[in-house]
Image (cartoon, coloured by chain):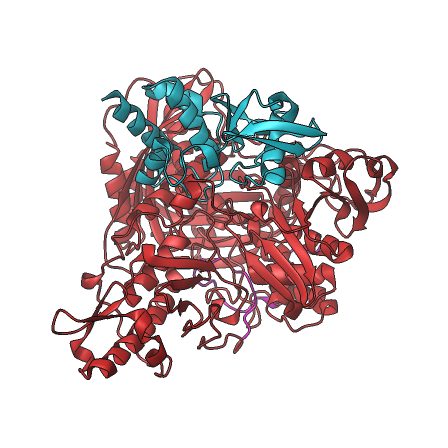
């Protein structure tokens, strides 16, 4: 594959903000959300999000999926605030595919990039405020009082006399005749009743009683179960299969070849799995990708040697300064391919009906799922309805929709309801991975300051893989035969006026916060043919590790304290400084520790949020032990502070899991060696450190919280291990080494 | 073949192959979807149920092992009475534990079994007992605090 020519050809603009790029821009596609047909008899549905029924029920259509990050509670809190109905009195409905529900940050109906609260902060509050304004105007008509004299309180309009009130439900007929105001005034922060105060998760009761319905829990009348035998190596193709033994087993209904392998349909999952084990399949592996982590890094090193790459940020003359510097430090870091391992394995359910195809899926992109279903089923997107469920974890995994492609193809052949379930082994072996990335640094030091910085990042672009369904999802009227062309055009035009720039390789590196006069950040494109995707914090997951480890190496070379050294380079970055100082102080930075323990620090901003962490670690019986993580985070205004805290906690443990264990690898035949939790290890309860989370309160606009806790955890642990052992950790997962402390 | 099992206090008959893991019988024959599939090899604990009061992984328990109606199986749906919550579920709400929630049925069933056997386990015992239940969202610190609060509450 041509590694860089394409990028050079289509390069137009300079790097923008470090955002996850998901799709092509299609101007004029989103329609203004207006009144719609209600889903309940007699109800009033004044916009795409709200519906009030005559019994007083308020239904809120949530357009960002719930995968644990808290959208059910968070976005509902926003609408509750402006509508003035308590969050717990609002029924949350998961959105269908619809133009009104497109995520404005990406031009697709996706949940990702820690964008849900940020992109709903005005849009959803305004939707609530408009409806409240109409209800107020309706009550003003009833009472013949000036609108300005009326107020609201939990689902009622209140009369200025302090005694009379009218429930919203009793105003529906009048309200339906009012026109929506163009301009609305949003509630002032000092008047917030729920924002910043509401903490109890609205989905918690369903989740502690086993009642929350995930994709895997979908149940349809007459439903059959499907499993798929997929290629044993990436890129292997089906030649032939013998299903005679499988078909003879109890409960087996059908065995059929599909685009992605051989599907077995049975009366139960267990019977389908047993039959799959009896298939004998011949695969053509002549074009199979046969790589290992080591071979991929060899490829990357060669690419990095051969090409300086695309300049993504350049200030001054870093190369020149480095050439003439007295003190130059060089280092190389490796971040491996990682699986997502959501607790709910991939699955989807589909059924052919009179009007088309119905799909139920735990997906981060219902519009992408619709294209995926259209791709393999023969139905057009207009004939496909996607129902989204609770997601048993997402972390980026459910932005890719192969499970929907599979189930749609099987269901359209079988003409009976099909639930497709991936086993855990399927889930690990056929994941779309966090890309492996190589980082090379050169830094010049003089008088305790970094004078030049050269960071070369080598690896693939995620958009090259993501374009498959994302490009077509922007043109749902396009015939299926053009899907692959659209994807190719999307890839070809990445970083032009047609398609936004893909920051997935460079985010967290181009925005390095340290004041360095001569600075160069570049990306050398190299793709090993391994399918890759977004993984919690995306590019920040590896750039945070690389940048913050190198900064620590520079501090050590300069003979400086790592916190003081960072602060010296952050004179004009007050919010970075603030979280670093608060984390260091709360962690007792510089203070004494029990024998055999050490601290490490890291600071990283991602998805708008500033996070500093101090990790305290030791090595016991040859194993790394993390004792304590102190985290200070500034995400601006918090809608549900305890959910912010939860996301920092979870983000830290996700990062530590990668730092301690995360790695997948292939054998010489291209077989992935990991398959389940015994060999793709996640941090467990008994290894969990004490977590101390400090949330910086301020009135800045809200920023992302789902991902920013992850990036600093990895380098903070690595830096602690260096402080402990004197051995630098330049590759994850970290090794305890021989230096038992 | 027809198998009789006692689940959440009621005897039921299901027509399932006897080597079928209890997990799938609960979910797909009996419609009890609260018990989750995570790994299929007893590594993650998402499928944890009580078998005669002890926490067991239903994904590696052949249904034949609990057949006959002598053995009592309890799932998350039967942990508390109708319209009430078990103290562990109350503590989960109090500590805002669930994120995605997928593993939480299993976590709660493990915690309830632990607290049933030992009224006041210490932190080390809680950690050791709960180590068999994975959570990818990272809710362990809150799970720990929730169990601690129930243990402390019953001890006082």
Chain drawn cyan in the picture = B
**What secondary structure is the stretch in magenta mostly built from?**
loop
Q: Is residue A628 visible?
A: no
Lateral position of residue A111 relative to residue A474, left or right = left
Q: Nearer the viewer, residue A243 or A29?
A: A243
Q: Nearer the viewer, residue A526 or A59?
A: A59
At 68% across and 72% down in the image, what residue appears? Answer: A478
Q: Nearer the viewer, residue A564 or B119?
A: B119
Lateral position of residue A556 relative to residue A266, left or right = left
- Picture quarter with the N terminus of chain A: bottom right
Chain drawn red in the picture = A
Looking at the picture, how far across and down is residue A490, in whole percent?
63, 66
Looking at the picture, how far across and down is residue A164, in whole percent?
17, 71
In the image, residue A19 above or below residue A233? below
Lateral position of residue A22 relative to residue A590, left or right = right
Determine if the magenta segment contains residue A6.
yes
At 58% across and 43% down in the image, what residue appears? Answer: A436
Looking at the picture, how far across and down is residue B142, in whole percent?
35, 35
Determine if the magenta segment contains residue A65.
no
The quarter of the picture where residue B3 lies is top right
Return the residue found at the far top: A621
The quarter of the picture where residue A586 lies is top left
Q: Which residues are magenta?
A: A1-26
- Picture quarter with the C terminus of chain A: top left
Q: Is residue A481 visible?
A: yes
At 59% across and 60% down in the image, what residue appears? Answer: A386
């Amino acid at each position: 594959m041509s590694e860089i020519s394409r990028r050079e050809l289509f390069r137009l603009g300079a790097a923008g903000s470090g955002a996850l790029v998901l799709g092509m821009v299609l101007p004029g596609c989103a329609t203004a959300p207006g009144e719609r047909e209600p889903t309940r008899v007699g109800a009033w549905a004044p916009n795409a999000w709200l519906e009030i029924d005559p019994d007083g029920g308020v239904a809120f259509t949530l357009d960002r999926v719930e995968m644990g990050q808290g959208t059910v509670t968070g976005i509902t809190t926003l609408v509750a605030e402006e509508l003035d109905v308590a969050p717990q009195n609002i029924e949350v409905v998961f959105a269908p595919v619809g133009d009104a529900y497109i995520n404005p940050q990406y031009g697709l109906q996706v949940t990702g990039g820690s964008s849900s609260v940020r992109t709903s902060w005005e849009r959803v509050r305004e939707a609530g405020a408009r409806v409240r304004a109409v209800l107020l105007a309706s009550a003003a008509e009833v009472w013949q009082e000036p609108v300005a004299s009326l107020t609201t309180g939990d689902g009622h309009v209140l009369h200025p006399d302090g005694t009379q009130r009218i429930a919203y439900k009793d105003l529906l007929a009048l309200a339906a005749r009012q026109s929506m105001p163009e301009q609305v005034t949003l509630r002032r922060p000092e008047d917030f009743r729920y924002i910043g105060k509401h903490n109890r998760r609205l989905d918690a009761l369903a989740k502690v009683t086993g009642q929350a319905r995930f994709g895997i829990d979908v149940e349809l009348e007459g439903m059959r179960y499907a499993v798929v035998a997929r290629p044993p190596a990436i890129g292997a193709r089906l030649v032939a299969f013998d299903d005679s033994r499988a078909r003879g087993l109890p409960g087996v209904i059908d065995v059929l070849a599909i685009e992605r392998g051989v599907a077995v349909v049975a009366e139960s999952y267990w019977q389908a799995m047993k039959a799959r084990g009896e298939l004998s399949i011949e695969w053509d592996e002549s074009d199979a990708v046969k790589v290992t982590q080591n071979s991929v890094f060899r490829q990357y090193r060669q690419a990095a040697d051969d090409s300086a790459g695309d300049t993504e940020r350049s200030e001054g003359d870093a190369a020149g300064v480095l050439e003439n510097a007295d003190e130059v430090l060089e280092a190389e870091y490796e971040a491996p391919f990682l699986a997502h391992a959501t607790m709910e394995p991939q699955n989807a359910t589909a059924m052919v009906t009179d009007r088309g195809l119905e799909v139920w899926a735990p997906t981060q992109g219902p519009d992408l799922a619709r294209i995926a279903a259209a791709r393999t089923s023969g139905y057009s997107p207009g004939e496909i309805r996607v129902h989204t469920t609770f997601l048993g974890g997402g972390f980026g995994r459910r932005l890719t929709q192969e499970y929907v492609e599979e189930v749609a193809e099987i269901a359209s052949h079988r003409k009976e309801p099909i639930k497709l379930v991936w086993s855990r082994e399927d889930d690990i072996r056929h994941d779309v991975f966090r890309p492996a990335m190589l980082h090379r640094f050169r830094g010049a030091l003089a008088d305790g300051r970094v004078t030049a910085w050269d960071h070369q990042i080598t690896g693939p672009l995620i958009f090259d893989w993501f374009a498959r369904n994302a490009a077509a999802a922007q043109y749902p009227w396009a015939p299926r035969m053009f899907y692959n062309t659209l994807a190719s055009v999307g890839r070809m035009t990445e970083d032009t006026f047609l398609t936004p720039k893909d920051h997935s390789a460079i985010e967290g590196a181009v925005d390095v916060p340290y004041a360095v006069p001569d600075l160069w950040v570049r990306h050398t494109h190299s793709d090993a043919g391994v399918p890759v995707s977004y993984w919690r914090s995306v590019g920040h997951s590896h750039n945070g590790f690389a940048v913050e480890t190198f900064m620590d190496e520079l501090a050590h070379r300069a003979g400086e304290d790592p916190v003081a050294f960072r602060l010296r380079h952050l004179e004009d970055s007050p919010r970075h400084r603030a979280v670093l100082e608060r984390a260091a102080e709360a962690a007792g930075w510089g203070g004494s520790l029990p024998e055999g323990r050490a601290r490490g620090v890291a600071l990283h901003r991602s998805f708008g949020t500033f996070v500093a962490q101090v990790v305290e670690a030791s090595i016991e019986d040859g194993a790394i032990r993390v004792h304590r993580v102190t985290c200070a985070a500034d995400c601006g205004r918090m809608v549900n502070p305890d959910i912010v805290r939860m996301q920092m906690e979870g983000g830290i443990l996700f990062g530590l899991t990668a730092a301690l264990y995360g790695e997948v690898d292939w054998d010489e035949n291209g077989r992935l060696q990991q398959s389940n939790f015994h060999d793709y290890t996640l941090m467990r309860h008994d290894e969990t450190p004490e977590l101390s989370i400090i949330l910086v309160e301020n009135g800045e606009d809200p920023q992302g919280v789902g991902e920013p806790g992850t990036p600093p955890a990895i380098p903070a642990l690595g830096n602690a291990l260096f402080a402990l052992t004197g051995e630098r950790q330049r590759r994850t997962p970290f090794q305890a080494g021989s230096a038992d402390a | 073949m027809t198998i009789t099992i006692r689940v959440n206090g009621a005897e039921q008959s299901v027509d399932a192959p006897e080597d079928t893991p209890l997990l799938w019988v609960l979910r797909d024959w009996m419609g009890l979807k609260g018990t989750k599939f995570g790994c299929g090899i007893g590594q993650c604990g998402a499928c944890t149920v009580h078998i005669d009061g002890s926490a067991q992984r239903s994904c590696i328990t052949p249904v034949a092992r609990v057949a006959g109606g002598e053995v009592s199986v309890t799932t998350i749906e039967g942990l508390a009475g109708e319209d009430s919550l078990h103290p562990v579920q109350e503590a989960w709400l109090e500590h805002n534990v669930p994120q995605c929630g997928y593993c939480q049925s299993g976590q709660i069933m493990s915690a309830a079994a632990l607290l049933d056997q030992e009224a006041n386990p210490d932190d080390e015992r809680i950690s050791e007992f709960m180590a068999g239940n994975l959570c990818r969202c990272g809710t362990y610190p809150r799970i720990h605090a929730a169990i601690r609060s129930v243990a402390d509450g019953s001890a006082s």
